[in-house]
Amino acid sequence: MIKSMSSPDKLTRIFAMVETFNDKGAAKGGRGSKAKRYRRMAQVHERTAAQSQSVEAREMELRLAQAYRALADNEDWLDGKTEPTSVP
């Protein structure tokens, strides 16, 4: 079972996420800003992982960070900025 974060930790994470999605690039729209927001979310989850006290919480946060980085890479590919790394 994953230990729950204390209230200050939850609030810090929530405010970081809100700030990430309210950045100026998001208001302009476009896929470039979406990839940027995904990378920022990955950073938020990496910072949260570094502060996590339980192994389970740390692993979950690192998986979330990895998922957000994959989403950012996909957005870059959709914009034609990168080539696909593998084709199924």
Image (cartoon, helix red, strand yellow):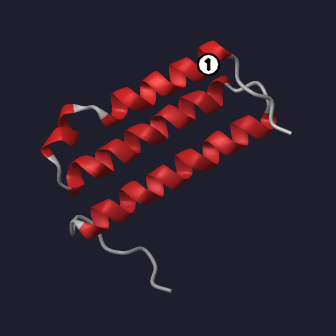
Which residue is disc 1 drawn over? 9
Looking at the picture, does residue 5 appear above or below residue 75? above
Question: Where is residue 82, by image quadrant?
Answer: bottom left
Q: Measuring 30% from the left and 68% from the top, which residue is drawn there?
A: 77
Q: Quadrant of the N terminus?
A: top right
Q: Measuring 33% from the left and 43% from the top, which residue is drawn there?
A: 37
* Residue 45 pos. (x, y %): 54, 36
Looking at the picture, does residue 87 appear above or below residue 5? below
Farthest residue to the right: give it.
Answer: 1
Q: How many marks?
A: 1
- Looking at the picture, tell me which residue is in the foreground, 1 or 46: 1
Name the amino acid type tagged 1.
Asp
* Residue 36 pos. (x, y %): 30, 45
Mark 1 crowd level (few <14, some 14–19, many ≥20, 10 Å Cα): few
Looking at the picture, does residue 56 appear above or below residue 48? below
Answer with left or right where residue 57 lies relative to residue 79.
right
* Residue 88 pos. (x, y %): 50, 86
Q: Measuring 21% from the left and 65% from the top, which residue is drawn there?
A: 79
Q: Secondary structure at mark 1?
A: helix
Farthest residue to the top: give it.
Answer: 8
Question: Where is residue 87, by image quadrant?
Answer: bottom left
Q: Measuring 31% from the left and 61% from the top, which residue is drawn there?
A: 75
Answer with left or right where residue 64 lies relative to residue 78.
right
